[in-house]
Image (cartoon, grey):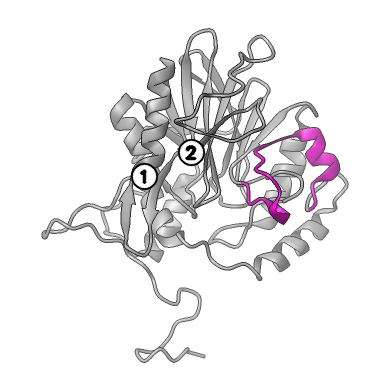
Amino acid sequence: MTVKHAETSPVTSLSAPQVGDHPASVDGAPRIEVFYDPTTYTLTYLVSDPASGDAIVIDPVLDYDVLGSVTSTHNVEALERHIRARGLRLRGVLETHAHADHLSGSQYLKRRFEVPVAIGDRITVVQETFKGVFDLDPDFAVDGSQFDQLLHDGQTYAFGSLKVAAIATPGHTPACMSYLVGDALFTGDALFTEDYGTGRCDFPRGDAAALYGSVHDRLYALPPATRVFVGHDYQPGGRALRWETTIGASRDHNIQLRADTPEAAFVAMRQARDKTLSAPRLLFPSVQVNIDAGRLPKPHGNGLRYLRVPMNLRRPTDDDGTPRL
């Protein structure tokens, strides 16, 4: 894991001296520290109030080696050490959605800091959808009760002294939620930096038209100077790591969705592009764990945990592997 302060440019390792450790530039603005997992291209945010020391974490990562089917806690351990070294009071863990590309580290932080795990209230739709895909046990709840707090569109929530406004941004998944903390907007997989575009919409219950409305009609209505902190950076063209843009830059320059992009053009582009994309490497492990609020599957009688991985989800086959027409 690498860590950066949002106002700095060089990437430093967590064990190296912190660079650019400055207070928020505007009174009342949060301090934002950025952690990057290069294996999944995921950006995790530690958002804190400089005055009180209250903090939240957005989208933590639990490491998972898919070949060996082994989890590890390097990312969240580093985050825990950093929080304790800074003397922050963690008040909650927020998920922007049920991720399909990494396992959530939320339960690790919940256990060690005794804080709630929160997600958008439409996680229930995702749970209903994937309960069938994974053929989960009948008692798997689809009411969101695995999470400590379900956040509702348009509501503002207090995590200690931090005020978090929830903005529903469905499209990538039905349950995607962006979070506005002061002048900082955390968009998850809805909106990326302007040189990369937007999130894919080809997962079950994804909707390109809904994503257009979420970004074009809702996020782009925010003030142009609003800082945008994205959920992933894939470093297009091999450029240096980025995690921040603005609403103004996105409206004017986003390569997939600008303020003047017609809905029909965006939907056609998004659907055509999504057809060319491979499934995320950790799709099935991630979603299965993340709809259960980051909990690993319960051990079987032999003490081992097992993931369910559907085969040929979109193209069923016979027993010998022959595709069914």
Residue 291: x and y in percent read: 40, 49
In the rendered image, the vertical position of residue 176 relative to residue 161, given as above or below: below
In the rendered image, the vertical position of residue 78 relative to residue 200, given as above or below: above
Residue 104: x and y in percent read: 41, 44
In the rendered image, the vertical position of residue 257 relative to residue 306, given as above or below: above
**Label 1: how many Cα within 10 Å (few below 14, some 14–19, many 20+):** many
Q: Is residue 64 left or right of residue 241?
A: left
Outermost residue, left side: 301
Q: Indicate the amino acid at tag 2.
A: Glu
Residue 180, quarter of the rendered image:
top right
Residue that mark 2 sits on? 95
Is 163 in front, or is 105?
Answer: 105
**Local secondary structure at mark 1:** loop
CB under 8 Å between callouts 2 and 1? yes
**Segment colored magenta:** 233-255
Is 280 in front, or is 309?
Answer: 280
Residue that mark 1 sits on? 294
Q: Is residue 247 left or right of residue 183?
A: right
Residue 134, quarter of the rendered image:
bottom left
* Residue 89 in view here: no
Q: Is residue 35 magenta?
A: no
Give the total number of marks visible in the rendering: 2
Q: Indicate the amino acid at tag 1.
A: Gly
Question: Residue at left 82%, top 59%?
Answer: 265
**Label 2: how many Cα within 10 Å (few below 14, some 14–19, many 20+):** many
**Local secondary structure at mark 2:** loop
